[in-house]
Image (cartoon, helix red, strand yellow):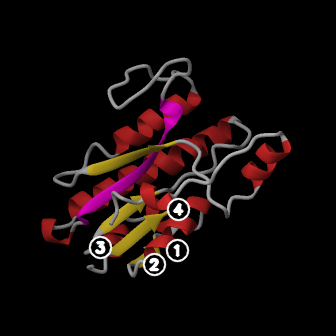
Amino acid sequence: MKTLKIKITGASGYLGKTISNLLTEKGHKVSGIERKLLYGSTNDLQAEIRNCDAIINLAGSPILQRWTDKNKATIVDSRVKTTQNLVQAINNLPLNEQPKKFISASAIGVYATGFMHDESSQNFDNGFVGSVVKQWEAASNGLSLLKAVLGEASVLLTEGAEVLPRNLTEAGFEFQYPDINSALKEIV
């Protein structure tokens, strides 16, 4: 198996740490992209991502916080602006130096409740979360020749999750942890 050079935004978050550890265990070279690079000079960001095999875009301020106007703006910018900056940096690289894959997180919050959904669903949520997800997904539309893979995930839990499982267990819910390796099939 070829060792891949993978860059991750949001690498310090729960999912970023989990994915980084799993990919490292599989022998891949994984490193995070610093937050300051995502908001800074496109040239600096280009230097960071040049010749990597894949970018996994997980950056985003936690959605589970009080939705003040300031926090809502941070939630949007931390997803949309960072993705737009990544797309610009990728597109400015020569084709032979661009990553082969761009995997960007998304969320099931884009879909309206009360419906059955699949890949062709058009029943979108018109609230804040739906708006954030639509903007976030649209931010990767500008990729030149590189195909973006959008992963619409619901709550993804592993044994390392603490707050949500504890709260659910205390409320009487039982659940099984998913095999996170199945969520990584698009990467390796």
Tag 1 secondary structure:
helix
Q: Distance between the residues labelled 1 and 3?
A: 18 Å
Circles 1 and 4, Cβ within 8 Å, touching? The answer is no
Circles 1 and 3, Cβ within 8 Å, touching? The answer is no
Q: Distance between the residues labelled 1 and 2?
A: 5 Å
User: Which amino acid is tagged 4?
Assistant: Gly
Circles 1 and 2, Cβ within 8 Å, touching? The answer is yes
Residue to which mark 2 is pinned:
24
Q: Is residue 85 left or right of residue 174?
A: left
Look at 27% across and 60% down and name the residue there: 101
Q: Distance between the residues labelled 1 and 4?
A: 13 Å
| Res. 117 in view | yes
Earlier in the chain: of badge 1 and badge 4, it is 4
Earlier in the chain: of badge 4 and badge 2, it is 4
User: Which of the labelled discs sits on residue 10, or is there none?
Assistant: 4
Residue to which mark 3 is pinned:
52
User: Which amino acid is tagged 1?
Assistant: Asn
Q: Is residue 153 left or right of residue 45?
A: right
Residue to which mark 1 is pinned:
21
Tag 2 secondary structure:
helix
